[in-house]
Amino acid sequence: MDLSTHVLSPVAVVDQLLDCVVTHIVTVPDYVMMSVYREIESRGAPRLVYCCTEDEAVTIAAGLHIGGARPMVMMQNQGLYASLNAIRAIGLDARLPIFMMIGQFGREHANLGRPASESNRLLVRNCERLLDALEIPFVACERASDVARIADAYRIAQEREWPSAALIGTYTAWEPALESDVPAASTDGISA
Amino acid sequence: MTMSTEDAVSTLARHRPPDAVALSPMSPLRFFPKMSSSDLNLSCVPLMGGASALGLGIALAQPARKVLVLDGDGSLLMQLGTLATVSGQAPSNYYHFVFDNGVWFEGGADFPLPAAGRLSWTGLALAAGYASTCSFDDADDLASALPSLLSCRGPVLTQLQIDTSAADRRPWSATNLQDVTPDSQFTRMGTEARTVAAALRDGVSP
């Protein structure tokens, strides 16, 4: 597996969020998208709201939306599992548009380029199934050409007044390490 | 000195600033909307534990408007980390009222909360970093303090010590069944959220 083909630029990701005029990112930090946080911090926007649990993040985002802001949630796939009841109440029953960018923590390199639903890791492969079961539309992002889909998913949530998600399937790059410095060797998974 | 949930809610309703957003879950919800009708009321159901975080989001988006969170002690226990999150964001317009009755399903079942009677909500909030706290076990004292309390810089947590012997419902049993949950219980929060959002967007005050 050549990992240089499966990497996302944090600059491009944050550009997408700013194009959508996202005002707040409510989050429990994710291991996969570390460099995105650093990029947001360096730009000073959108405003990062760090909180204690992912269900709290979903609920704070709902309050921000009601108050007229344009929030979104960043979390890890473990956070999706942890926040299901809040997503059910806020997104599905109350029909509030909650866009979630979810890092696929634990995805093995051997699975890159293949459907995450074929991952050897239960945590990873059931993530898409879980979203399907909840009727939450999502996009999978793991290559540079996928980044524009983040904005598409954000807009779907706003248009449908319903949750949506972007599954970030690979580590976001540390600039300027993009492409040239990414190791080609397959080192299977990194533990938190 | 004793104060029922209804007494406490009635007092808060009388002193609620008309342009304040008010969120209520569970027990307070049985009374508050009838006592303080407004397009700025938001029911936090069915999402036990969500009121504090939902209120925080509104407070951050609307920093010039007071947000009153009428929270249950059982609800807040489910989302205890929110005390730290609120403290970290330090919204000066955030007023957190915790109904400390020590039970789940007040009157209907009265299941005891973990550490009921031993938890200090003011202690927890101060330790988390709230700007100030206070506690009341009497509705008249609460009424006297509310005007100045609501002019304090938030976040403020007020512990309301509730006497459950004055609960408005009888224990559930074979001859006193629980109410069937209506469809509206699942759509209510969304409907009210859109009403609150529109009122905030249009600058409408009740």
Image: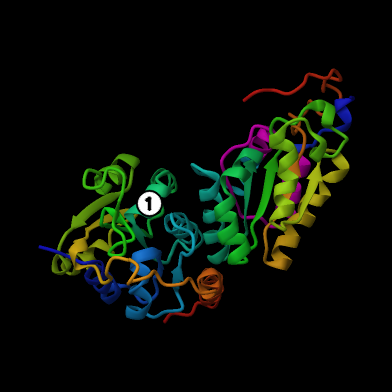
Q: Is residue A48 left or right of residue A106?
A: left
Q: Which residue is mark 1?
A: B76
Query: How many marks do you count on the picture?
Result: 1
The residue lying at 55 percent from left, 76 percent from top is B198
**Mark 1: few, some, or many residues within 10 Å (few <14, many ≥20)?**
many
Instruction: Return the x and y of residue B14 as percentages of the image width and height.
Output: 26, 76
Q: Is residue B21 highlighted in magenta? A: no
Q: Residue at x 34, y 65 (%)?
A: B27
**Horizontal arrangement in the rendering, residue B45 relative to residue B187 (left or right):** left
Res B197 quadrant in image: bottom right
Magenta-drawn stretch contains A34:
yes
Quarter of the figure with the C terminus of chain A: top right
Residue A154 lies, with reference to residue A181, above or below; the image says below
Residue type highlighted by circle 1: Leu
Q: Is residue B198 left or right of residue B18?
A: right
Q: Is residue A100 left or right of residue B184?
A: right
Instruction: Write down the quadrant of residue B159 in the picture.
Output: bottom left
Of residues B43 and B153, the one drawn nearer to the viewer in this rendering:
B43
Report the chain holding disc 1.
B
Residue shown at 26% from the left, 74% from the top: B10
Residue B157: image quadrant is bottom left
Q: Which residues are magenta?
A: A11-39
Q: Position of residue B30 (x, y in %)?
A: 35, 72
Nearer to us in this view, B203 or B124: B124
Q: Tell me residue A11's x, y (percent).
A: 75, 40
Res B196 seen here: yes
Q: Secondary structure at mark 1?
A: helix
Name, please, the residue furthest toward the front: B174
Q: What percent of the width, then of the height, locates residue A146?
A: 85, 45
Considering only vertical position in the picture, is A86 above or below B178? above
